Image (cartoon, grey):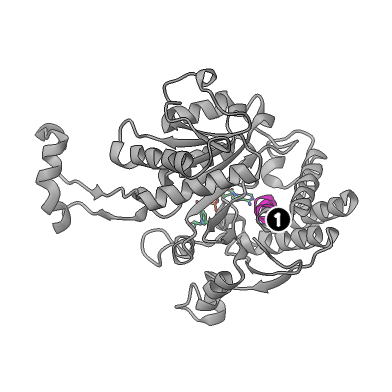
Amino acid sequence: IEVPDNPIIPIIHGDGIGKDVGPAAQKVLEAAAEATGREISWMRVYAGESAREKYGEDVNLPDETVEAIEEHRVAIKGPLTTPVGAGFRSLNVALRQTLDLYANVRPTYYLDGVPSPMSAPEEMDMVTFRENTEDVYAGIEWEAGTDEVEQVRDFVEQEMGFDETIHEGPVGIGIKPITEKGSKRLVREAIDYALEHDRDKVTLVHKGNIMKFTEGQFSEWGMEVADEEYPDDEVFAAPDSLWEEQDDIDIPEGAVMVEERLADAMLQWMQLRTDEFDVLAMPNLNGDYLSDAAGAQIGGLGIAPGGNFGKGRMLAEPVHGSAPKRAGQDMANPTAMILSGRLMFDYLGWDDAADLIRDAVEETISSGKVTYDLERQLEDAEKLATSEYTDEVVSNIEKLS
Ligand code: NAD
């Protein structure tokens, strides 16, 4: 997208460890922007606890925050606490829905020096596109015993092949909506990303063999996008890739191949044949599980970056939550939020600044200077506070630029 060299970027530091990692990321992003001849005008906006403190007990997500992100189009946020059970609904979900940020994007790549359970973690370099608005996460479900459940109960029992020894008693019911529009715009986003970033392949991950009219349709609609909306020599749809050997598929030279994989098998392939995968696109639930599992292979929550995309807007946010136990102790790992900022820079087209951030973080970690979460998994590492680690990354930015 077109942005000035000194854009206004709204930032929400976030709750819990957001108070530690938010300012840390801001410092690193500022240093990388400055080192590449740019300047960021930050606009502090509020949500969650900081919004309640500023605007009053009932205000969790002020209109000003939503309007700022709408207007400036690119923003970054730290984690926000969602109470379990009673209380307000997730502010993260509210932000994604209000701004229609329909693609949750998580790059998963290995940084030298990070502890990993894999034998060849350096082969991991994937970007997952998870549909953000539909599927069983749309929250359309009914508690056992409610009128809604009783109305459809006979039908459900009949469809399940009712056996009273197994199925009698309370039943909860949920609905899994998957739309053509929602599926197609997500897959389009993934394909465009692959084209822009010279990636070879987009893999549609689904369970369409079992859920034919939802996940199966997701895959069919995705293949339609690949087949009908791009020239064959740019994007090649391989709808038979589930059953055919890759080598038998005739892909035009240089084209991005759009293939498909079943979700359960994919979790295995991701670990056994890591280097075969590039960009993955999938419905909401698959994306949630798969991206967390991928993140665990390359250092876990303290490292894993993410962002939400849609309609010419992007909201960067780390995968992790507010980790209340570690809040305000200058302990938390700011890398996930820093690398989410890197993803934001990438979206702004600031490739040199984005590369500089990655190099500086990698230099810091590979020299054995890490926060507590990585230190306890590494031999001979030095445990740094959030602020010390941040200063180290900033100093590496200055050295490397
Ligand atoms: P969490 O990610 O906050 O923490 C899980 C554990 O991971 C922590 O106990 C901590 O040991 C570790 N951890 C996480 N981030 C870390 C970091 N940067 N550095 C070092 N260690 C880190 O998950 P949770 O405990 O399930 O959730 C806590 C709160 O966060 C909940 O209210 C939840 O709703 C919220 N949450 C928000 C978001 C978001 O804002 N996008 C995402 C997930 C959870």
Q: Is residue 338 above or below residue 198?
A: below
Residue 148 left/right relative to 69: left
Depth check, front residue: 20 or 34: 34
Q: Residue shown at 59%/56% (left/top)?
A: 317
Residue 249 left/right relative to 224: right
Depth check, front residue: 231 or 8: 231
Q: Residue shown at 20%/51% (left/top)?
A: 144
Image quadrant assignment for residue 160:
top left
Q: Residue shown at 15%/43% (left/top)?
A: 156
Residue 51 at least partly seen: yes
* Residues drawn in magenta: 332-343
CB of mark 1 near ligand 1 (< 8 Å): no
Q: Is residue 95 above or below residue 376?
A: below
Estimate the x, y position of residue 48 in percent, counting from the top left.
Answer: 52, 69
Three-letter residue code for mark 1: Gly
Estimate the x, y position of residue 3 in percent, counting from the top left.
Answer: 69, 65
Image quadrant assignment for residue 391:
bottom right
342 inside magenta stretch: yes
Q: How many marks?
A: 1
Estimate the x, y position of residue 136 in percent, counting from the top left.
Answer: 34, 48
Specify the quadrant that holds the N terminus. Answer: bottom right
From the image, tell me which residue sits under label 1: 349
Estimate the x, y position of residue 2 in percent, counting from the top left.
Answer: 67, 63
